[in-house]
Image (spheres, rainbow, N blue to C red):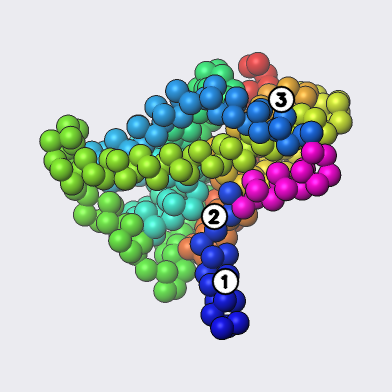
Amino acid sequence: MTTNFVSRINRSVRTLDGVFLAIALILLILAILVPPQVAESIHFTLNSLWKVAPFLLLSIAIAAYAQASGADNLIARAFQGRVSMMIPVAAIIGALSPFCSCGVIPLIAALLSMGVPVAAVMSFWLSSPLMDPSMFILTAATLGFQFAIAKTIAAIGIGLLGGFGTLIFIKSLIKFGVSPSAFDAPLREGVGNGGCAGSKIRNPKAVLWRFWSDGDRRQKFWKGAQKNAGFLGKWLALAFLLESLMLVYLPNGWVGAIAGEDHWLSVVGATLIGIPAYLNGYAALPLVKGLLEQGMSPGAGMAFLLGGGATSIPAMIAVFALARRPVFLAYLGFACLGSVLAGLAFNLIV
């Protein structure tokens, strides 16, 4: 009897969503320590969700449409022709594709296993987790269109930096008589070819723009919309909850003193902080908004979003498990360098 009871509890714990559990835990701690803050934080969170609701619904619809119509199969077309042409196309496609830093891993495995040049793959690999249609809409709603447009340009720029940087590095190795073996065979032994998720690259299906004429695709649209709504909704709720606490308990001027100046050190610091602190691209938006309101420089905020998106700990673990060490170090180096340069440029523009 006791064993069955414990088993049921263990199964229940495993099925709990970590994000909802975090929200409940935060509210419980507030209820114990500062009860009045519970109502204030809930009100702030609901009000913030209501303000972004139109943008949230639009982003959900766009992501579900891409899945139902098969528009995400167009990714395969970015990797045709000469490498010098693949790189800019891959950077642009990557910035428009709906993949996160971990979700893009099976596609990368499929591309590399098919022999696509690593320079072109690096371009897509870097730009893909930094921006997508849903991210653009929510970034514009949270931080403004100027920020969203700048982040899109930065994502493409980082992809170009990584792609052409990798191409130049490989050619330099060959010029000096060094074999670029790690870049000729970039996958770790036994990684595979991306499995079912890589089929978009290996066997791209036709795009059906008017997907509603197909019953299966209509069903796929609604399932995708429900999944995206749950995913985005829970992460934004957690982010707004944390923002409500940050605005109350973070000392005034503390952020401005550390990352408020238009100094290159603040941008570098924000990039490095993004590695351990960045959890999710959507959750990061309200947090950065709160930090900007407390004095963080725009360039530091941009660097945090870009650096964290590409080099967060979950993303780095996925990349390290997939690629050989030189390729992993190249990915990490170009991501950090591109984020710093984008942050510095944004400070100059703003």
Residue at (27, 56) in percent of width and height = 199
Answer with mark 2 or mark 3, whichever residue precedes in sequence.
Answer: 2
Residue highlighted by disc 2:
17
Quadrant location, the N terminus: bottom right
Label 1 SS: helix
Mark 1 residue type: Asn
Nearer to us of marks 3 and 1 is 1
- Tell me where residue 292 sits by quadrant: top right
For label 3, the SS is: helix
- Residue name at image x 51 percent, y 38 percent: 233
Given the image, on which type of amino acid does mark 3 rest?
A: Leu
Left or right, 57 with reference to 246: left
Residue 348 located left or right of residue 189: right
Residue 22 in magenta stretch:
yes
Q: Name the residue nearer the viewer: 322 or 26.
A: 26
Who comes first in sequence, dot 1 or dot 2?
1
Q: Which residue: 56% across, 41% down?
A: 235
Q: Position of residue 171 (x, y in %)?
A: 47, 50
Viewer-nearest residue: 347 or 283: 283
| On screen, residue 293 above or below 242 | above
Which residue is outermost to the front?
1
Q: Position of residue 268 (x, y in %)?
A: 73, 38
How many numbered markers are drawn? Answer: 3
Bounds of the magenta segment? 21-35
Discs 3, 1 touching: Cβ within 8 Å: no
Residue 148 spot, x, y in % from top left: 52, 24
The label shown at residue 292 is: 3
Q: For mark 2, does the 10 Å Cα neighbourhood hold few (<14), some (14 to 19), or many (20 or more) residues?
A: few
- Residue 314 % position (x, y): 58, 55
Q: From what the image shows, is residue 243 above or below residue 31?
A: above
| Residue at 21% from the left image edge and 54% from the top image edge | 203
The residue pinned by badge 1 equals: 10
